[in-house]
Image: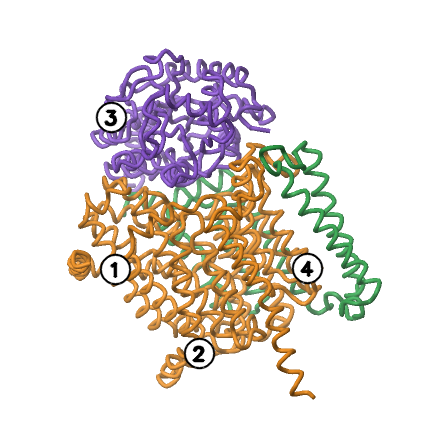
Amino acid sequence: MSILKTLTFSAAALAVTAPAALAEWQPRKPVEFIIMAGTGGGADQIARLLQGLIEKKDLSPRPFIPINKPGGSGAEALRYLQDKAGDDHTVMMTLNSFYTTPIIQSELGVDVTEFTPIGLMAMDTFLLWVNTDRDDITDLDSYVETVKAAGLDWKVGGTGSGQEDSVLTAMMEAAFEYEVTYIPFPGGGTVAKNLVGNQIDSTVNNPSEQMEFFRAGNSKPLVQFTGERMEAFPDVPTAKELGVDIEYYMQRSVNGPPGMSAEAVEWYTNLFSELFNSQEWQDFCTSDGLTCDNFLNGGDLGEFHATQVVAHQNLIEQVGAAAITGE
Amino acid sequence: MTTRTAELLMGFATLLVSLGLMWNVWSDGLRIDWVDGRGPGAGVWPFWLSLGMALASLATIIRWFQGKTPESQSLEPYIARETMFLVVVSAVSILVLLLLMTIIGTYLSLMAFMLFYVRFLGRHSWGTTMAFVIGTPIFVYLLFEVALTKYLPKGWPIFEEGFLWLDNFRWQYF
Amino acid sequence: METILVSLAGGLLQAFEPLNLFMIFAGCLAGLLVGCMPGLGSVNGVAILLPVTFLVPPTAAIIFLAALYYGAMYGGAISSITLGIPGASTAVATVFDGRPMAQAGKADKALMAAAIASFIGGTVSIILFTLFAPPLAAFALKFGPQEEFALMLLAFATFIGLGGDDIPKTIFSILLGLVMAAIGFDIISGQPRMIFFDMVEFQRGIGFLVLAIGIYGIGEMLWTLESTKGKVQMHNVTITWARMKENFGQIKEYINSTWVGSFLGFFVGTLPAAGATPASLMSYGLSKTFSKDPESFGKGNISGVAAPEAANNAASTGSMLPMITLGIPGSPTTAILLGGMIIWGLRPGPLLFQESPDFVWGLIGSMYVANFATVLLNIALIPVFIRVLAMPFTLLTPIIFVLCVLGVFATTDRMFDTWIMLILGVGGYLLRKLNYPVAPAVLAIVLGPLAERSLRQSLISSQGDVTTFITRPISLTCIILAILLMSYPLIQRMMRRRTAEPSEN
């Protein structure tokens, strides 16, 4: 009799606690943290830093497992996420190939606006870099002059045809009416090394990839492609100040597969906004020249993605897919 | 099948594969020529090397007809009957293991695989068998999931639920 | 010089603090365990690191990491020798002679040689690292795509003669590996290549481990099952004190290869693009070419174990150099290390030496100690590893199959690769039965992507001008060396004939 009593009692207790547990969704298994780029790159570093912070601050009952899916400029990752529709335990760290890859590879059948936006962690910026040895280049004008004189002998390094920096390089070619030779390398770090070693003449790198070389005096930025001058580079003019209408950012946002449940989205949004506001993250942003002013999420981020997709479509149309792929 | 026949068939198979690769590169519209000012196009490497594979396969076929390779003279069976069993069973058992992993998940399939291999192929005692059947998933769990934080395939949702129920204890008590 | 010694002494003292010393042993052990599993390497082992990081201060964590890195490097040789499966691409060349030695009942000798050679390689490398880090980093910067391509040519040249005696079949095998390396997304043009059946998974390409574990894991096991009819187990050796001493004394036989491997490995490892795999392959090839008895390579020559092992350990230390001095990872593992350093608030780069000397010298000091700890642990554990070989085949086989499947899954987190592994394994087995050599395909898939990319990068940067390879001094030197190496066996044969003829008369 007493056993039965205990049972009914605990069943009742369960019934009472269950709704409370339901309201607060939590991951029940390790969360796959997909990175649409290879190990060592900017997106990878950010994802691993976030994973570390989640663990350090004990923000999640289950760990986040970073998984790199770099295939096809992120095509592999995008398709993977698409196929995970409705899954609440997968999120993805994205960069701008989130927009460009589905446009360039239309046969992929991925519409990123269907994905579940979770949070915009940062806007990464681009600067134009040359080696400090180039005494003849001091500003954008002397740069353009030198490049025009060199013609195709001018070698611009980048992280691969169809990647963000190749888009930006193509934009510059169109704006300044010159043509350069674009050489793809695997990863921004290798590009930076080749710039410092004078294997290439210039590059558009993210600040994080050049910061240490810049601090050591090996490379110098000429212009930043932002709206306003960044805190980290107060002396470097923006392209707009110089009358060149190029403003280009790399978004670093977290997104889920299509059809994620509302409770899960809420939980992830809270998690990433907490990370966003943490001292560690803000410090990282400052030291790496990332812009982390406001945390976009939900519908705002979805809108942001939609406008970015259109903007990239126009961009790729303008410069032509051939200018990006090179063949 | 004798080794002699097998070599000829393999020669044709590799030739077909090589031609298939060439066709694949060609039909994708990749540049297989020298692009002015850029060097070889995207298709050059795979296309021309596949051509090399095709030529090497042809050479093997010609040498077979000339009887130059030791295999082309050999009338020994390609895979002897008594070993055929072991090889085929092993290959098929891995195939089944991979299939099961996507259906009933890694751990149950590992247990089934071990049971089959240790007990039915190896004819070991039930004691040894059970040690392997139970020990393998535990070891794999501790190494891959706990230490290396890998999430191994769990199969269909119902099996995943079962695993999560068990896995829950780790998070609750450790 | 003096400052270096003072800093180094400080670093060593740090390494000998009780907590740090404990971290060294724990790291070595964890690394050994992870490294000896087929497919798992230091990249996976770094996952263990993260929780540790939150428990101990950064210096202790990096010490743990260095130890783990070393342990995993040694561990790769263990699976290469005892199971015949290269645990990582760096240990491929160790299989060539390590496996035959194990089959001949000399697994303990091979393991001992691997441990000692690794120790020498690692130590030479750290000493060079300590003394010459800044100038070497400057030299590494001189390496552009042209030099990389020339280096790849050199790597291929050291492998002339590795194939079987059937030339068309050897050529087929090399080309197959090179073509397979091109599957996937082409970063130069941004176009997908050879995406069979429109499966998006192929965009990732076929990784080295998938092919190597397929061929050496699955294929080799099928082969062994067949040739032994599933009955015979491998030779069991009982380890006695006397035998250990004898094994230790054998060092004379392979010391030359070890020195060559150590210096070559360090040098190649410091070049950002190359890393430990080409280094170990080149070291093996060189050892074979200049051996008095090249015929015995591939059949269980102890120098064939020592040479690649010395080189891959030296190179893995070397590959820390571009990471620490330039912030550029030389291998996937160092890429993850880099991530770890960022979590600790350290920025690898040219200024790290000046801004965080405690950290850098603590790391260097711990590399000395970790190297020593690993060799001790490794030799002490030889009897344990040998026990694996004493297992009945019907128990060992399923374990190996399971480890192959899970190891391949763990490298990329996708079932797709395990299917490819099975297909390649069975295919490799069928080819091997017809005397197609499989090793060249495995080598080609490692070097292929590097070779193709650097070739095309060079030609793009020279706008299609082929002379770019011979107008640059370092590249020219490598190419001349490659040509000399390729013609060396011919020259040798001619020389031999010339000296042989008079005696015949």
Check the residue under mark 4 and report the chain it is in. C
Where residue C483 sits: x, y (%)? 57, 59
Same chain, labels 1 and 2: yes
Q: Which mark is residue C73?
A: none
A187 left or right of C350? right
Q: Colour of chain B?
A: green
Same chain, labels 3 and 1: no
B66 left or right of A92? right
Same chain, labels 2 and 3: no
Res. A105 in view: yes
Q: Which mark is residue C431?
A: 4
Where residue C291 sits: x, y (%)? 52, 74
Q: Colour of chain C?
A: orange
Res. A30 in view: no
Q: Residue at x 73, y 68 (%)?
A: B80
Helix, strand or loop at label 4? It is: helix
Same chain, labels 4 and 1: yes
Q: Which mark is residue C24?
A: 1
* Residue occupying the far right of the picture: B65
Q: Which mark is residue C253?
A: 2
- Residue at which label 3 appears: A232
Mark 2 near mark 3, Cβ–Cβ under 8 Å? no
Q: Colour of chain A?
A: purple
Mark 3 near mark 4, Cβ–Cβ under 8 Å? no
Check the residue under mark 2 and report the chain it is in. C
A193 left or right of C130? right
Calculate the distance from the C-alpha at mark 4 to the C-alpha at mark 2.
Answer: 35 Å
> Mark 1 or 2 closer to N-term?
1
Mark 4 near mark 2, Cβ–Cβ under 8 Å? no
